[in-house]
Amino acid sequence: VQLQASGGGLVQPGESLRLSCAASGSTARINVMGWYRQVPGKQRELVALVTNGGSPNYADSVKGRFTISRDDAKNTVYLLMSRLRPEDTAIYYCTAVIWGSSYWGQGTLVTVSS
């Protein structure tokens, strides 16, 4: 499975941004898709995941502000980020899980700054 993320950029606090991640290859075997983020010098952390059945799981820090969705017809997962904060600044990585094995996209930088 190959993952191509897009949509990162520079926004001001309080603004919104939508990330997209398109999967190609053996997409029929994907169980879970989602997003992690990483700040230089820190561990990569979970942002949000969504299962085949559509059940989302969010990190506490983004609940109520971020929404994950999945379009299986397009093999794409989205992350709508609202009310962004400076602490949301990170490289965002999309991931796909196939029977316990994780695949990663190249990452897209999100910077929240005034």
Image (cartoon, grey):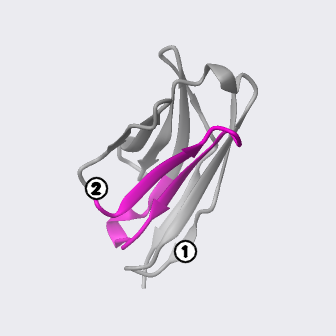
- Dividing the picture into quadrants, the one containing residue 27 is top right
Q: Is residue 75 above or below residue 59?
A: above
Which residues are the magenta region? Answer: 64-91
Q: Nearer the viewer, residue 51 or 21?
A: 51
Position of 78 relative to 75 (above/below)? below
Residue 104: % across, % down: 58, 34
Tell me if 107 is positioned left or right of 84 in this view: right
User: Quarter holding the C terminus?
Assistant: bottom left
Residue at image coords 76%, 26%: 25
Residue 53: image x %, image y %?
46, 31
Q: Which residue is mark 2?
A: 63
* On-image quarter of the N terminus: top right
Q: Which mark is residue 72?
A: none
The picture quadrant where one finds residue 22 is: top right
Q: Position of residue 73 (x, y in %)?
A: 69, 39
Amino acid type at image mark 2: Lys
Which amino acid, by three-letter code, is at mark 1?
Answer: Leu
Residue farthest bottom in this picture: 114
Mark found first going from the N terminus, 1 or 2: 1
Could you give the CA–CA distance between mark 1 and mark 2, rounded to whole angstroms?
21 Å
Would residue 80 be counted in the magenta stretch? yes
Numbered tag placed on residue 10 in the rendering: 1
